[in-house]
Image (tube, rainbow, N blue to C red):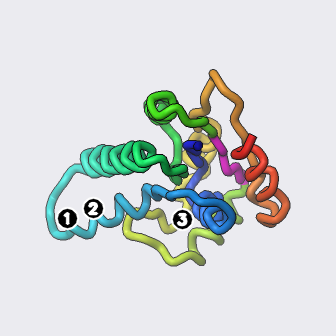
Amino acid sequence: MFFVQFSGFPGSGKSTLSRQIAKRIEVVIIDHDIVKSSLLHSLEGTQIDAKLVEKISYNIDWSLIEFQLSQGNNVLFDSPCLYEEMIEKGTALAKKYNVKYKYVECYLDDMEVINLRLRNRKRMISQIKEIESLDSFKYTIENSKKPSNCKSLVVNTGQPIECYLQEVMNYINE
């Protein structure tokens, strides 16, 4: 049993990679964009603070993750990991349910490639259309939170997925 946190800038390939993994092994994917987009659709036309929407959607994510782990399911969490709290919650849940904790960062530092991916995907309401500034892009990829007490994996998602998919599978299964 395992719990995997996928992290990376929007458009870095987290969802593509998680779906490819789900085709190969039994795993429940909790996709933050699906949860947040659903919440935003429900609140359409309502004035609500963006930080509150973010907090509520992450609380829903963590509730779903905990439920799936309590049912004995492998779980993959597809979300940027920008806060230390994300690592703390992930490792605590893995410990609580006695499952392996894994962390995979989808790393792509090419703003042009990211923007191309962002423009060409079917965008959910919670997802960005494109990178607004080079400074915020660089800040985000340089400040992604990683666990300090266990091995993590960083994959270059600028390559074709076939170049790193097996490496991720091996890491998850070790």
Q: Tag 3, which secondary structure?
A: loop
Identify the secondary structure beneath mark 2. Answer: helix
Residue at the spot x=59%, y=77% of the render? 120
* Residue 11 visible at all: no
Q: Nearer the viewer, residue 32 or 115?
A: 32
Residue 163 falls in which quadrant of the image?
Answer: bottom right
The answer to whether the residues at label 1 and label 2 have Cβ atoms under 8 Å apart is: yes
Q: In x, y percent, where is residue 112?
A: 69, 64
Magenta residues, as a range? 103-109
The residue pinned by badge 3 equals: 130
Q: In the image, residue 4 lies at what x, y percent? A: 58, 45
Which of the two residues, 137 or 48, is positioned nearer the viewer here?
A: 48
- Measured Cα–Cα span from mark 1 to mark 2: 6 Å
Distance from the alpha carbon under mark 3 to that under mark 1: 23 Å
Front tag of 2 and 3: 2
Q: Nearer the viewer, mark 3 or mark 1?
A: 1
Q: Is residue 103 left or right of residue 51?
A: right
Q: Quadrant of the N terminus?
A: top right
Residue 43 percent coordinates (x, y): 19, 64
Q: Which residue sits at x=22%, y=50%?
A: 49
| Residue 79 in sight from this viewpoint | yes
Residue 43: give its label.
1
Mark linked to residue 10: none
Is residue 104 one of those drawn in magenta? yes
- Tell me the amino acid under the disc marked 2: Leu
Identify residue type, mark 3.
Answer: Glu
Residue drawn at (20%, 69%) of the image:
44
> Can you tell which mark lies on residue 39?
2
